[in-house]
Amino acid sequence: MSRTSHQFRSLCLAPIVHTLRLRRARSVLPPLLYSPSRPSLADLIRRSIFLTHTTVVSRKLGRSLVAIRLSRRLAVRPSPEALVQRCVLPPECVPGREGPGRVAPALVAKKRAVERERVKDGLRRWVGSVWERRVRERAEGVRRWEERCGIGRVWRLRRFWERVGRGEIQGS
C-alpha cells in the first residue's frame, strides 16, 4: 500500500497506525501460530522451507565438493581437436579449422542448412541460365532454318527490321 501513492505512504508510516497494527497483531497472531492446519517444524525442515544451521552448512559443503569435482574434471577433459577426431564435435566448432570462425555446436546444423540452401540457389541460377541459353539457341536455329527453307511470308522483311534494330542498316 505504501508504494501506491504518497498519501497512503504517509498513512502507513504514521506512528499511531503502527501501534494499532502491533496491538492487532498481538491478538490475531497467536491463534494462527497454533492452528492445526499449520505444518509442524519437522515438516517444514523436511520440505526444505525452514533451514537449520546444520542444513545450511551441509549445503555449502556439498556445493564446494561439486565445485572441486568439476574443476578436476575440467582440467583433464580432452581438447576440442581430440573431440573432433573422436567425432564428438563437428569440425566447425574448432578454431583454425574449416573456415574463419568458430561455431557453437547447437548452431552447426543451421549453418550447414544455410550453406546447402546457398549452393542450391547457385545451382538453380546456373541451370536457369543454361536453360535460357539453350532455348535462345534453339529459337535462333529454328529461325535460321526457316530463312534457309523460305518458310513464312515475311521472313525477309522481319530480317530487315531486325538488322535495322541492331543498327547494321540505316532505316529510311
Image: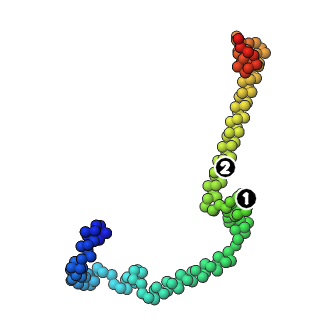
Residue position for label 2: 116
- Which residue corresponds to the image point at 70% horizontal and 37% vertical from the top-left? 127
From where the camera sits, is residue 116 visible? yes
| Viewer-closest of 91 and 2 | 2
Residue 111 image offset from top left, x and y in percent: 64, 55
- Which residue corresponds to the image point at 75% horizontal and 16% vertical from the top-left? 169
Question: 148 left or right of 94?
Answer: right
Amino acid marked by disc 1: Glu
- Which residue corresponds to the image point at 74% horizontal and 23% vertical from the top-left? 140
Q: What separation in Å lies between label 1 and label 2 (alpha carbons)?
A: 16 Å
Residue 159 image offset from top left, x and y in percent: 73, 16
Residue position for label 1: 98
Label 1 residue SS: loop
Tell me: residue 73, above or below residue 133: below
| Viewer-closest of 40 and 140 | 140
In this rendering, the label closer to the viewer, 1 or 2: 1
Q: Quadrant of the N terminus?
A: bottom left
Label 2 residue SS: helix
Amino acid marked by disc 2: Arg
Q: Residue furthest bottom?
A: 54
Residue 164 image offset from top left, x and y in percent: 72, 17
